[in-house]
Amino acid sequence: MIGPHSENPAQSLLDPINYYSGTLIPDNWDTLEEFFNWFVLEAKMPLMIPWNATIAHGDDFTAISIFKKASYQVEMFLEHPSICIKPHCHPNVETINLHLGGGEQWPSQEDYNMSTRWGTIDWKKPAGLLHGDNPSGERFLGWCMLSFQKWVNNEPIKSVASHWKGTTAGPIHDKLIRDHYPDSFVNNGYADVTMSQIEHEIMVEFNLINK
Ligand SMILES: [Fe+2]
């Protein structure tokens, strides 16, 4: 039991090696679904924040990685109140979302004081699949979810919100994308990490795209 009588209260009282000693992390997931099942059902959603995880934030979200191994990652997203996610895709990332509730959404009648939204799953979106577009813009008081990801290219740790093609959430989101993909096309509410600024200019010049 951890209590106030510890000899050195300034020292960390939780040793991650001991705390997670019963959690064995596989290295042979073949699919995002396998990884999802291990993390949620076997490991019971451990909070293993990578030491080099950074806060990602855009105009309507805040996120941090809570687990990363090789090309697999879990991010916790705090979706701000009245969010309206614009149409977009993540060109080289497969995703599964697991909603955790909050924001006074669908209160549970059970003992845990949780939302009945907890456990709602958006099943896998293949890399590059267009999604988003919530026309009502009404999302109550925000909510919390986990984003499970398999990156096609095993990139250094970063938010899936930076790996974006489509309409962005606004200027703060634009900056996040630009910070992680400085050569990619980002312009006033639209981004495409598969295209460089120069490629975009050439496409426009030859009338291959409109924007
Ligand atoms: Fe997305």
Image (spheres, rainbow, N blue to C red):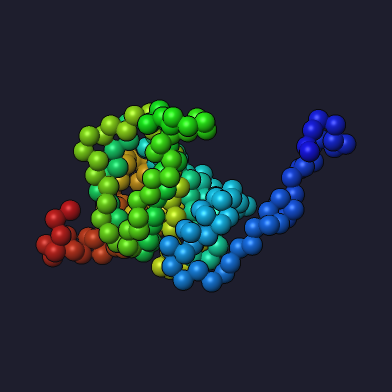
Residue 6 appears in the figure: yes
Residue 193 appears in the figure: no
Judged left or right of residue 32, residue 171 is left
**Residue 57 lies in what quarter of the image?**
top left
Q: Position of residue 33 (x, y in %)?
A: 43, 62
Give whichever of 161, 19 is nearer the camera.
Answer: 19
**Residue at image x 43%, y 31%?**
108
**Residue 153 lies in what quarter of the image?**
bottom left
Q: Residue furthest left?
A: 207
**Residue at image x 52%, y 31%?**
111
Q: Position of residue 34 (x, y in %)?
A: 47, 64
Give whichever of 193, 146 is nearer the camera.
Answer: 146
**Residue at image x 44%, y 55%?**
148
Q: Is residue 196 above or below residue 10?
A: below
**Residue at image x 59%, y 48%?**
47
Q: Is residue 115 above or below residue 66?
A: above
Q: Position of residue 56 (x, y in %)?
A: 47, 45
Q: Residue furthest front?
A: 110
Judged left or right of residue 199, residue 24 is right
**Residue 91 lies in what quarter of the image?**
bottom left
Give whichever of 41, 142 is nearer the camera.
Answer: 41
Give whichever of 192, 15 is nearer the camera.
Answer: 15
**Quadrant into which the N terminus falls:** top right
Judged left or right of residue 205, residue 144 is right
Q: Residue furthest right?
A: 7
Q: Position of residue 172 (x, y in %)?
A: 38, 40
